[in-house]
Image (cartoon, rainbow, N blue to C red):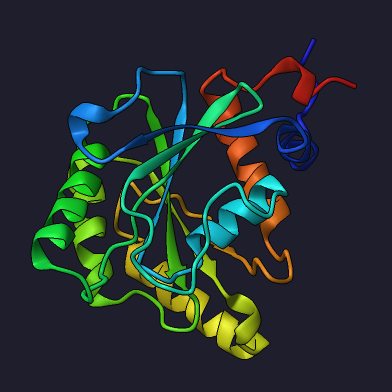
Amino acid sequence: MDEPEIDFTEAGRRLFTRECEFYWAAAKKDGLPPPRGVEIAFAGRSNVGKSSLINALAGRTGLARTSNTPGRTQELNFFEIAGAFSIVDMPGYGFAAVGKDKVSAWTGLIHDYLKGRVELARVFLLIDARHGIKDTDRPILDTLGKSAVAYQVILTKSDELTAAQRGARLAEVEAAIKKNAAAHPQIIMTSSRKNDGIAELRASIASLLNDRSALPEWATAE
């Protein structure tokens, strides 16, 4: 008998109705936590709306720290979600209004983690829909491609574009990543403010966990 088809939208919704908690911060590669299973990382330029998106995804207002000041997240912050997997909030890159040594340390931490973490299942790479892929995104894209780390592009702040602008931006980004074997073909348009795309992002996570045999039974129970 064929296995019943999984409703990943519902499974994703259920995942984020359970406990979400911070459990570790790492400022250096040798300070990473012991493995707790599947890790999913969120990366993006400073002020791309990463913390706001993580909070919207988790249905919490204060899980990830948000700020109007770019560069506030200076460590890899680990959050356990429903005892099933971990979200990793990475430092924003491309922020130049701090010392070069600090920028270099953040950048090195990001690249070391992306290249060397066995538990890392996917990186959600956040791109501001208003601006598209910029030069500051290229080093991360190069690292992901060279390390064969699977990633999926998430376009943020899409509510600030018209429907025509969203379509054009989507086509532009699709064309930019289509030759990269590490890139997931689905690009998700999101708005943390309006909750747009959150259900699709949760469903993508549920599908990924299922592929890794890490989706809890309670998330798919009838």
Q: In this view, does 74 lie above or below 166?
A: above
For the N terminus, the image quarter is: top right
Report x, y in % for residue 104. Answer: 12, 57
Q: Is residue 159 above or below residue 60?
A: below
Residue farthest along the right direction in this orientation:
222
Q: Residue at x 62, y 66 (%)?
A: 190
For the C terminus, the image quarter is: top right
Q: Residue at x 60, y 23 (%)?
A: 84
Which residue is more in the foreground, 186 or 119? 119
Locate residue 216: give its quadrant.
top right
* 4 to the left or right of 71: right
Q: In this view, does 30 lie above or below 156?
A: above
Report x, y in % for residue 169. Answer: 49, 80
Residue farthest along the top direction in this orientation:
1
* 119 to the left or right of 168: left
Report x, y in % for residue 75. Answer: 32, 46
